Image: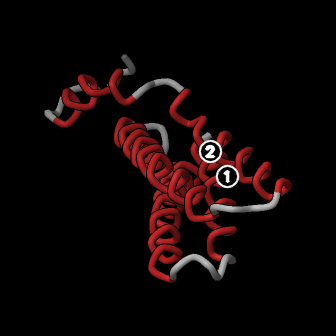
Amino acid sequence: MTGSYLGAASALVERVLLDDRVPESERVRLLVEVEGAMLAAEGVARRIDDGGGADESTFADSLYVRYGVQDTLSRVVPRAVELLGDLDSTAAEEVGYLATYADGLALYPPAPSQMTGPLATYLADGPLTIA
């Protein structure tokens, strides 16, 4: 799910990158955030695909990445929409759809607030369980 929502955010950022009205510094900042999140998600996915995904460590890393991506999306998506600004109706509709879709990751369990205790326990060398 993380990759799907990140893909929608990446599509928004791509539109920002192609918009010459947006200052370079803003374009680069959004690109760095989205690419960093994508690389983290790909790293965990690769680890799982390579057979290293059946342990608590990989589960914990998956949660770290998912919550990190969620935080990145909460910053990048509204900023991309703001930077795209005045668009014709078709483009505005597309941007609105992508923005709404990209915001959906926060709806999937377990919520970060549910996992605070279990992650704290895990970080103190206890077992990692889903709340």
User: Which residue has dot 2 on it?
Assistant: 102
* Residue 59 percent across, percent down from the top left: 42, 37
Residue closer to the observer: 108 or 53: 108
Residue furthest to the right: 90
Tell me which residue sits at (27%, 24%) in the image.
118
> Farthest residue in the left direction?
124
Say which quadrant the C terminus sits in. top left
Q: Which mark is residue 8?
A: 1
Say above or below: 125 vs 13.
above
Closer-to-camera residue (128/111): 111
Question: Which kind of residue does numbered mark 2 sit on?
Answer: Ala
130 versus 53 height, above or below: above
Q: Residue at x 66, y 40 (%)?
A: 100
Pick whichever of labels 2 and 1 is earlier in the sequence: 1
Name the one closer to the observer, 82 or 66: 82
Q: Residue 85 in the image: state x and y as whole percent.
A: 63, 61
Disc tally is: 2
**Label 1 crowd (10 A; few <14 / some 14-19 / many >=20):** many
Q: Secondary structure at mark 1?
A: helix
Residue drawn at point x = 50 percent, y = 64 percent: 39
Left or right position of 68 against 51: left
